[in-house]
Image: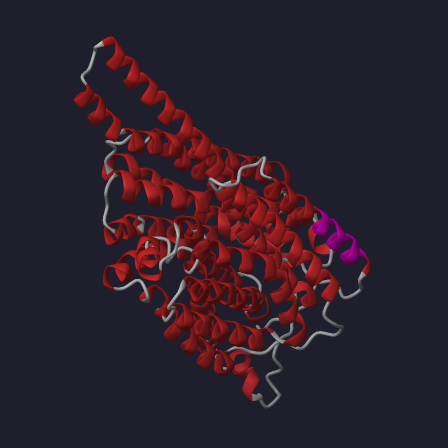
Amino acid sequence: MSTVADPTRTPEPQDAVATAPADAPRRGFGLALAIIGGAQLMIVLDGTIVNIALPHIQTDLGFSQASLSWVVNAYALSIGSLLLLGGRLGDLLGRRKMLVVGVLLFASASLVGGLALNPAMLIVSRIVQGLGAAIASPAALALITTTFPAGKERNRAMGVYAAMSGAGAAVGLILGGVLTEYNWRWTFFINVPIGLLVAFLAPRVLVESEAGQGRLDLGGALTGTAGLVGIVYGLTHAAEPTGGWGSSLTIACLVAGVAFLAAFVVIERRNPFALLPIRILTDRTRGTSLFVMLLVGAGMFAMFYFLGLYIQQVLGYSPIKAGFAFLPFSAGIVAGAGIASALASRIDVRWISGPGALLATLGMWGFTNLTVDSGYASHLLPWIVVLAVGMGLTFVPLTLTATAGVREEDSGAASAALNTAQQIGGAIGLAALSTVFTHAFAGRAAQLSGAIQAQVQSGAITSAQAKQLGDAIPHIAQTYASTRGFYVGAGMILVGAILVFTLLTVKHGELAAREDVSGPHFG
């Protein structure tokens, strides 16, 4: 039920946002939203900001080709497996406090990463960055549900949050390109001033949530973390050249991950202080939203990875040019999120998210037509915009339906579940599509090599011509393999669209009612 400020009571300092004159709440809400959005943007963009810098990191720190992937994987594993724990810490200890702790931990680890002298130092810093993000990110989303009143204000806040979550990956690629041109270490240093500013302002603007009752679910934390680490690591290893789906290590990790998650479910059903109360997942609207977010996240993360490699390695873009090639994605996703935010209080969510997911499917399918001679303006830009607007339309309603109606004491866990779905979805998408890419690349390269050899033997071409044709094989095979991956990515998002249309049937009026009881807020 809503908590409305008593106008006859002398306002306490923490009530400043709630009891100020009519335009003061808007100013207070605006600054609060800037703080929460800034924290989320810093966390999300770090998932991609180092991607363009990887070749420079490899050269400077002496990473092997096999170990270089851990610069990305260490962060994804850490944040994906610890988000539930971070959300529960916010519920028990206070969300504003955990937001500050998380961003300070993140900023400190970023400083260490920028100063790294060897691979081990950088990888450890990435793990700690993931821990900081896992603490801060669910606190940020939970603070939206407990700070902004249901309706226009909360929809606007959710729109900004969703835009930061969606556009952050593209912004990371742009910043990665710009900063790498100067020095790759600045892809880490950039987080330090942002984190310090958020940590300084948060206690002065955001209202602290009440500390929850109960105790920390250590059994759930251990089994849940171990299960997610096992599955994400197994999927990641399956995509590596030395791994594969038949690898004993891949199979062992996946089996162990499933076993730990099964134990996690058993523990959570019996524990009154569960890390992730099962009631959060059994609600059809929320469960559907989380699963669709996982599918859409899988497609989007894979798109950034494969399209980024294609733009640099096939089209030959410089790091900064490759980064700016994704700028329209940021604009498109912000535009889509703004439209969805404006419509959410008037239209049922499935008529916003469903068409959005179909639009994103169309955009992903557009990339399946790429060739080694494709032009940016004619073959990339239109589909980037279509995909981005579709993602923006999809994210906002799913964020609302995934967090509306939860008990106030569960809001941190629900927020963590939403972020976990995105992160684990990204890991699953990259692993699955990387496997598709690897097999498609090998098959296409072998086919082309065989065709060239047959032409040489028949006398149709000379050895010199064969060498020239052979030099083009890697780019042709890479482009072909990327398009196969985009087909699978489009299929993932299409499944999400079908689920939205068939299962996400909550009415916008009912959603507003669910929001109104999702926890105390100020109006």
Counting from the top left corner in percent of width and height, residue 495 is at 55, 35
Q: Nearer the viewer, residue 202 or 504?
A: 202
In the rendered structure, the answer to whether residue 222 lies left or right of residue 107 reads right
Query: Which quadrant of the figure has residue 295?
Result: top right
The quarter of the image holding the N terminus is bottom right
- The scheme the figure's colours follow is secondary structure
Query: Which quadrant of the figure has residue 454?
Result: top left
Which residue is found at the position 44% from the left and 73% from the top? 107
Residue 347 visible at all: no
Q: How many marks?
A: 0
Which residue is found at the position 51% from the left and 42% from the top? 431
360 is within the stretch colored magenta = no
Counting from the top left corner in percent of width and height, residue 33 is at 46, 69
Counting from the top left corner in percent of width and height, residue 113 is at 41, 68
Residue 64 visible at all: yes
267 is within the stretch colored magenta = yes
Rendered view: 390 above or below 121: above
In the rendered structure, the answer to whether residue 102 lies left or right of residue 88 reads left
The quarter of the image holding the C terminus is bottom right
Q: Nearer the viewer, residue 263 or 344?
A: 263
> Bounds of the magenta span?
259-269
